Image: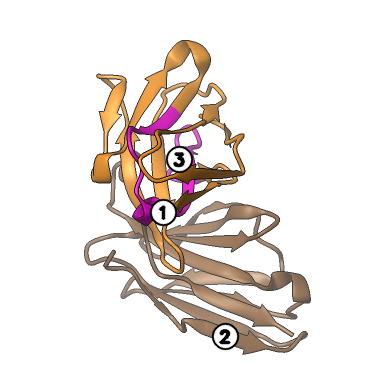
């Protein structure tokens, strides 16, 4: 993938609501996709990754993402969010043939108790 | 804990000054990446080193430079600082030899230029 875009800048949800954060990538050969999370005041942590195989990827803390090739999308989902999910979420993909990760602008998720 | 160590945690300095940010990668990781995170630009890749050699360059200004030492720690040098350089600077490392290895990030250095 050459570029990654996240269209939601800030999402506000109540606890127990379902979450879906959008991520679109531009085609660039082999597709490897990542979701990272940054909790307030902390470093980025890997949530999940897709390389090949089953397009539905399960990550940590109940998150999952679905790779839809026809839509160039890799949306992040969680059936029921908790207050502790309040964080910023970044979609990322490496440039073709490199380790350099390109990140989306990020989506801030605020979960209201 | 990601295993990537960055120092200092916070840095406050004046315009025109020069600072050095330090990063120790996870044990066994040969690659070190530097990223700048600011409110307006998001996460921007600056530069990557692999086993002491520069591997890739991103949006790094000419006033900025980096190096990776034989013990694999890395330093990012920022000179002639401007107000706009205020940001969070992250270092990350990854395992060698695999494009699919995820990045492991340090806690970052928050630079404030006054």
What hue does chain B carry in this figure? brown
- Quickly name the residue at label 2: B11
- Quickly name the residue at label 3: A98
Residue at (41, 66) in percent of width and height: A42
The reply to whether residue B63 is in sight is no
The part of the chain drawn in magenta is: A75-101
Nearer to the camera, A64 or A86: A86
Please tell me whether mark 3 sits on a helix, a strand or a loop.
Answer: loop
Q: Which of the image's four quarters has the C terminus of chain B?
A: bottom right
Using the image, determine if residue B8 lies above or below residue A78. Answer: below
The reply to whether residue B57 is in sight is yes
Using the image, determine if residue A97 lies above or below residue B69. Answer: above
Mark nearest the camera among 2 and 1 is 1
Residue at (26, 40) in percent of width and height: A62
What hue does chain A carry in this figure? orange
Residue A91 located within the stretch drawn in magenta: yes
Nearer to the camera, B97 or A89: A89
Question: Which class describes the residues within 10 Å of circle 2: few (<14), some (14-19), or many (20+)?
Answer: some
């Amino acid at each position: 993938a050459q570029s990654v875009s996240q269209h939601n800048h800030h999402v506000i949800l109540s606890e127990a609501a379902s979450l879906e954060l959008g991520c679109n990538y531009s085609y660039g050969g082999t597709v490897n996709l990542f979701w990272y999370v940054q909790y307030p005041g902390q470093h980025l942590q890997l949530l999940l990754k897709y390389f090949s195989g089953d397009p539905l990827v399960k990550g940590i803390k109940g998150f999952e993402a679905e790779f839809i090739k026809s839509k160039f999308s890799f949306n992040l989902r969680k059936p029921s969010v908790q207050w502790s999910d309040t964080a910023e979420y970044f979609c990322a993909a490496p440039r073709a043939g490199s380790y350099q990760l390109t990140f989306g602008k990020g989506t801030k998720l605020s979960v209201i108790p | 804990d990601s295993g990537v160590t960055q120092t200092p945690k916070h840095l406050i300095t004046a315009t025109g000054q020069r600072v050095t940010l330090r990063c120790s990668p996870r044990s066994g990781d040969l690659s070190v990446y530097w990223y700048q995170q600011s409110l307006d630009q998001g996460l921007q890749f600056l530069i990557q080193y692999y086993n002491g050699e520069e591997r890739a360059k991103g949006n790094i200004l000419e006033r900025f430079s980096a190096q990776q030492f034989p013990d694999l720690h890395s330093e990012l040098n920022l000179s002639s600082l401007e107000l706009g350089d205020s940001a969070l600077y992250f270092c990350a490392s990854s395992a060698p030899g695999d494009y699919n290895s995820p990045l492991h990030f340090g806690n970052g250095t928050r630079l404030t230029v006054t």
